[in-house]
Amino acid sequence: MDIFLQQILNGLVLGSVYALVALGYTMVYGILGLINFAHGEVVMIGAMIALTVMTILVGSTAGLPVALIVALAIAAAIAVCMTLAYSIERVAYRPLRNAPRLAPLITAIGMSILLQNVAMIIWGRQYKTFPRLFSSEPHTIAGANITDLQIVIIIVSAALMAALLLLVHFTRLGRAMRATSENQAIAGLMGVNVNKIISATFVIGAALGAVAGVLVAANYSIAHYSMGFMLGLKAFTAAVLGGIGNIGGAMLGGLLLGLIESIGAGYIGDVTGGFLGSHYQDVFAFLVLVLVLVLRPTGLMGERVAERA
């Protein structure tokens, strides 16, 4: 039972990050019907920018408090990722908005490869050690251990997801986003600036992705130019699991995928003597993707499908 509770906690931490990244995929798909495969690399850029800022501030003689260092690093990551996402949408996706659906998909894959290589040129091929700014002393809850950083990951992720729900359902921008997702042409006739709303969707998703990148790099204490590829695929799996285009579904799918991975890598790994342990945790994620696509292609909460006039 201790092992099971430990994997539940680990799964919630992992799933919280997946959910944040999955929101970027699902919001863009809900409005444009586009799978933005470059989103994982935007997340990676956020982690690398935060690492660079933290390294500079920690090595400086200013003696800044830890909370301020983290806040400045996250703010820099968010600013860079928001600018990058806006540029990607404006330069790579907007000219192809009325093109055949295969064209923007290929462009998204190309942007992913481009960003990976740019990051490799800037930060190198080596794994970068993320500064340890939180105590690694674990807290014991019913026999399971959880660190301060893991608690922060869960709280920050929950707060950001709640804020996004409030934004989408109770603000003017949110109403415009929902109107655009229903029908871009009619939303434009009703006075909605569709281009600005689409750009805002990319920017909001990038901001959430930047925070997720910082959290996952801090959790594993490393950052790498290719870290966004697998994280992006798993977040996409989470979005499909919950119902891509559905914001609540992305959150649910992320948490469920984190739990499935954690239990599969830990609890089931112990039962099988390590044969299905942590080295095979990716198998569980993509097995879920295959099963969902075969058994319920619309996901657990259903794909967000707009009625077309």
Image: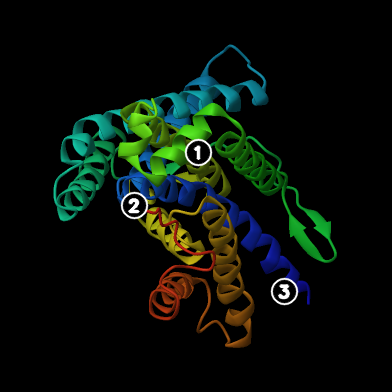
Residue 308: percent from the left, percent from the top? 34, 52
Mark 3 element type? helix
The residue at which mark 2 appears reads as: 308
Q: Residue at x 53, y 68 (%)?
A: 300
Tell me how far mark 2 sits from mark 3, CA to CA: 46 Å
Q: Are dots 3 and 1 in contact, CB under 8 Å?
A: no
Dot label at residue 4: 3
**Toward which corner of the image does residue 282 lie, by quadrant?**
bottom left
Q: Residue at x 51, y 39 (%)?
A: 214
Q: Nearer the viewer, residue 62 or 195?
A: 195
Mark 2 element type? loop
Q: Residues within 10 Å of mark 2 (few under 14, many from 20)?
A: few
The residue at which mark 1 appears reads as: 208
Q: Nearer the viewer, residue 62 or 258?
A: 258
Residue 173: percent from the left, percent from the top? 50, 29
Q: Residue extending furthest bottom? A: 272
Q: Nearer the viewer, residue 19 or 35?
A: 35
Three-letter code, disc 1: Leu
Q: Residue at x 55, y 24 (%)?
A: 58
Q: Is residue 237 left or right of residue 19?
A: left
Q: Is residue 17 left or right of residue 306?
A: right
Q: Is residue 72 above or below residue 307?
A: above
Tell me how far mark 3 sits from mark 1, CA to CA: 30 Å
Which badge, 3 or 1, is on the more N-terminal residue? Answer: 3
Which badge, 2 or 3, is on the more N-terminal residue? Answer: 3
Q: Which quadrant holds the N terminus? A: bottom right
Q: Residue at x 58, y 57 (%)?
A: 15
Residue 240: percent from the left, percent from the top? 43, 63
